[in-house]
Amino acid sequence: MTTHDNHWTSAITQIKPDEVRLRGYRIEDLMGRLTFAGAIYLALTGTLPQDGAARLLDAILVSSIDHGVTPPSTLAARTAASTGAPLNAAVAAGILSINRHHGGAIEDSMRLILDVVQAGGDAAALVSAYRSSGRRIPGLGHRIHTADPRAARLFALAEEAGVAAQGVRAIQDIAAALAEQTGRALPVNVDGAIAAVLVDLDIAPELANAFFIMARVPGLVAHIHEEGTRQRPVRLIDPADHDYDGPPPREWPPGD
């Protein structure tokens, strides 16, 4: 009779009695010293973030934490919550709605940016190829914003941190090439800006959409809780017929 060795290994976390190590570091040594975004970077890459990477990842997570009640993931989560589904099920409904056409553009943008970088920065040729094949260029334009304020802020933070490099230049060159070829400017949106920064942080493109998922979970939880505490069960949720009744516009830092 043949026996099979089922032994396997993992390089992420080591657990021993009274000891938890993430990528070799004691978890209690990281607590209070490493931001949550920094810990995400460590978990995903195996190394501690350098050169402002943790601050940029924090900014990425904040940039996508929520976008109102109309995104498909939010509507799915609120609909599930309206039925009385538990928190985990309602969150799962929202997460499962994040896909190619909602939240999935970050990976597509990263791959396009990497193609431009590998082509020696020739954005015009790749934009022309996309247009010839009828493909939409990811990372540009927005259904609501004519100039996405989140993208501009991410680019500014990347410049301040000294991280902005080939990725940021490539997405900006792509936007410029499209404007030149079509006569119509489509500014970089938050997905394109996140993709560019992730390229410059050497994050693998297959991990790209995970950042949108991780960022959106707190927003989904807030919507699920609000749905359960402010709305009647099993209601028809109209994404167009709603108003905002939260705090009025506030400035940062508080008190200024």
Image (cartoon, grey):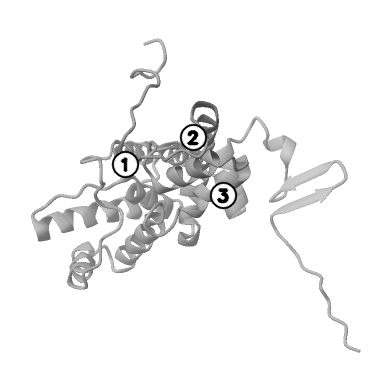
Indicate which disc residue 223 carries: 2
Choose top left, top right, bottom left or bottom right for residue 7. Answer: bottom right
Mark 1: which amino acid? Ala
* Dot 2 alpha-carbon crowd within 10 angstroms: few under 14, some 14 to 19, many 20 or more: many
* Dot 1 alpha-carbon crowd within 10 angstroms: few under 14, some 14 to 19, many 20 or more: many
- Name the quadrant of the N terminus: bottom right
Point out residue 85 in the picture as x, y percentages from the top left corner. 60, 43
Marks 2 and 3, the one that precedes in the sequence:
3
The residue that appears at 72% across and 61% down in the rendered structure is 10
Q: Residue furthest toward the right?
A: 1
Point out residue 185 in the picture as x, y percentages from the top left corner. 14, 49
Marks 2 and 1, the one that precedes in the sequence:
1
- Up the image or down, 256 lies above or below 94; here it is above
| Helix, strand or loop for disc 1 | helix
Mark 2: which amino acid? His
The residue that appears at 39% across and 54% down in the rendered structure is 106
Work out whether residue 220 or residue 40 is closer to the camera in this orientation and state it: 220
Identify the residue position indicated by label 3 in the image: 92
Disc 1 versus disc 3: distance between alpha carbons?
A: 27 Å
- Name the quadrant of the C terminus: top left
Work out whether residue 24 or residue 239 is closer to the camera in this orientation and state it: 239
Mark 3: which amino acid? Ala
Identify the residue position indicated by label 1 in the image: 151
Query: Is there CB contact under 8 Å for labels 1 and 3?
Result: no
| Helix, strand or loop for disc 3 | helix
Disc 2 versus disc 3: distance between alpha carbons?
A: 13 Å
Foreground mark, 2 or 1, reads 2
The reply to whether residue 185 is visible in this rendering is: yes
- Up the image or down, 6 lies above or below 2; here it is above
